[in-house]
């Protein structure tokens, strides 16, 4: 049995090996210098384009401060830039559909983070450590039969 295994390994060693092409870093940048990425959170889906600029963020044709009026949502959208310490260096344009404002802000944050890694692959490590490249899997739990909501039971009456 061992002699057969040795013979097979010798034959494999003599067989010419295919050279794998050298991998270039992933860059998804178009002719205009924009990186495109999609971000998702809950039921919201965002399509984001990031390019070098002066820090203008436009979501669905409106300024980010108008679209996301609550400061907490604006903070969520700005998170990727704060992590990499590049506030005001990139212009962001995006469209977001579905879900509520909180989910949409999370989707935009996810999309911006992914697009930044396509523009500058070196930024992947700090964004990954901050957890901005991972899609948040939490979503609303479905309603079950025999229950009022997902977990809430009907009122129990002893008598």
Image (cartoon, helix red, strand yellow):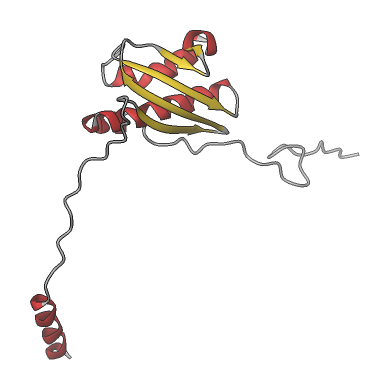
Nearest the eye: 37 or 70: 37
Query: Which quarter of the figure has residue 140?
Result: top right
Left or right of 148, for residue 119: left
Q: Residue at x 26, y 16 (%)?
A: 85
Nearest the eye: 92 or 82: 92
Considering only vertical position in the picture, is 147 above or below 123? below
Query: Which quarter of the figure has residue 77?
Result: top left
Q: Residue at x 28, y 14 (%)?
A: 89
Q: Residue furthest right?
A: 159
Residue 105, given in percent of the width and then of the height, sits at 49, 22
Left or right of 74, for residue 53: left
Quarter of the image with the N terminus in it: bottom left
Q: Is residue 156 visible?
A: yes
Residue 128, given in percent of the width and then of the height, sits at 30, 33
Q: Is residue 132 visible?
A: no
Residue 76, given in percent of the width and then of the height, sits at 44, 19
Left or right of 48, for residue 125: left
Q: Residue at x 11, y 84 (%)?
A: 6
Query: Which quarter of the figure has residue 139?
Result: top right
Nearest the eye: 69 or 53: 53
Q: Residue at x 20, y 48 (%)?
A: 23
Q: Residue furthest front?
A: 31
Quarter of the image with the C terminus in it: top right
Residue 10, given in percent of the width and then of the height, sits at 9, 81
Considering only vertical position in the picture, is 147 above or below 54? below
- Label tally: 0
């Amino acid at each position: 049995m061992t002699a057969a295994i040795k013979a097979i390994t010798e034959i494999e060693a003599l067989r010419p090996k295919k050279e794998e092409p050298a991998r270039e870093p992933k860059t998804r940048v178009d002719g205009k210098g924009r990186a495109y990425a999609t971000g998702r959170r809950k039921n919201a889906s965002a399509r984001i384009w990031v390019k070098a600029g002066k820090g203008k963020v436009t979501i669905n044709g409106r300024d980010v401060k108008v679209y996301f009026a609550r400061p907490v949502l604006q903070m969520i959208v700005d998170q990727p830039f704060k992590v990499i310490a590049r506030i005001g260096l990139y212009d962001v344009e995006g469209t977001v559909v579905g879900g509520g404002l909180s989910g949409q802000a999370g989707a935009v944050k996810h999309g911006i983070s992914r697009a930044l890694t396509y523009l500058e692959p070196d930024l992947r490590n700090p964004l990954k450590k901050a957890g901005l490249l991972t899609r948040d899997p939490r979503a609303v739990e479905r309603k079950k039969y025999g229950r009022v909501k997902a977990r809430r039971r009907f009122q129990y009456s002893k008598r």
